[in-house]
Image: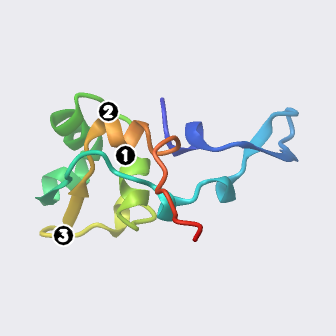
């Protein structure tokens, strides 16, 4: 399964198997530049209970739910309530969130 961790750099900390943990601080969500206009979606209790299916209906994939929630400022799906609003970031912007960065003027 794919998740937000696929977009993070490796840290220097290893688990018991010698695998490197992802560095959660390597993601800077404030610098993301969107190429397409997101839409707002009202969440139902059914969407919350089967969030993987909600992702499948909206994006055609069952994963990256944690990435979408993160970009909406929601730590995990259990914090959603019926009638909450989610900014539905287009899939290509979700997947390109690392490479699409805002340009800052240096003058």
Residue 107 percent across, percent down from the top left: 57, 71
In the rendered structure, are the residues bearing label 2 and label 1 in contact, judged by CB atoms less than 8 Å apart? yes
N-term-proximal mark, 3 vs 2 = 2
Residue 62's disc is 2
Q: Which residue is mark 3?
A: 84
Residues under numbered marks 3 and 2 in contact, where contact means CB atoms less than 8 Å apart: no
> What distance separates the C-alpha of mark 2 from that of mark 1?
7 Å
Task: Answer yes or no: is residue 64 visible.
Answer: no
Q: Quadrant of residue 75?
A: bottom left
- Identify the residue at image location x=23%, y=46%: 36
| Residue 54 % position (x, y) | 20, 43
**19 left or right of 43 in image:** right
Q: Position of residue 76 (x, y in %)?
A: 42, 60
**Element class at badge 3:** loop
* Residue found 63% across the figure and 44% down from its top: 8
Instruction: Name the residue at 49% across, 39% down.
Output: 3
Crowd rating for badge 2 (residues with CA inside 10 Å; few <14, some 14–19, many 20+): some
Q: Is residue 52 left or right of residue 32?
A: left
Residue 39, numbered label: none
Whether tag 1 and tag 3 are in contact, CB under 8 A, the answer is: no
Residue 2 higher or lower than 4, as above or below: above
Residue 72, compared with residue 63, is above or below; it is: below
Q: Earlier in the sequence, mark 1 or mark 3?
A: 1
Residue at numbered disc 1: 65
Left or right: residue 86 versus residue 103 is: left
From the top left corner, tell me how far across and down residue 10 is, in percent.
75, 41
Residue situated in front as seen by the camera: 25 or 3: 25
Find residue 83 and report its image quarter.
bottom left
Report how far apart the C-alphas of labels 1 and 3 lie in the structure: 16 Å
Mark 3 closeness class: few <14, some 14–19, many ≥20 residues within 10 Å: few
- Of residue 52 and residue 106, the one placed in the foreground of this image is 106
Q: Can I make out residue 11 in this image?
A: yes
């Amino acid at each position: 399964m794919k998740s937000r961790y696929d977009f993070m750099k490796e840290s220097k900390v290893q688990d018991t198997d010698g695998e490197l943990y992802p560095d959660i601080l390597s993601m800077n969500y404030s610098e993301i530049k969107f190429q397409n206009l997101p839409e707002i979606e009202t969440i139902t209790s059914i969407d919350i209970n089967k969030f993987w299916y909600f992702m499948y209906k909206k994006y055609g994939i069952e994963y990256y739910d944690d990435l979408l929630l993160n970009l909406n400022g929601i730590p995990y799906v259990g914090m959603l309530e019926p009638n909450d609003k989610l900014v539905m970031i287009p899939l290509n912007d979700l997947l390109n969130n690392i490479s699409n960065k805002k340009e800052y003027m240096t003058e």
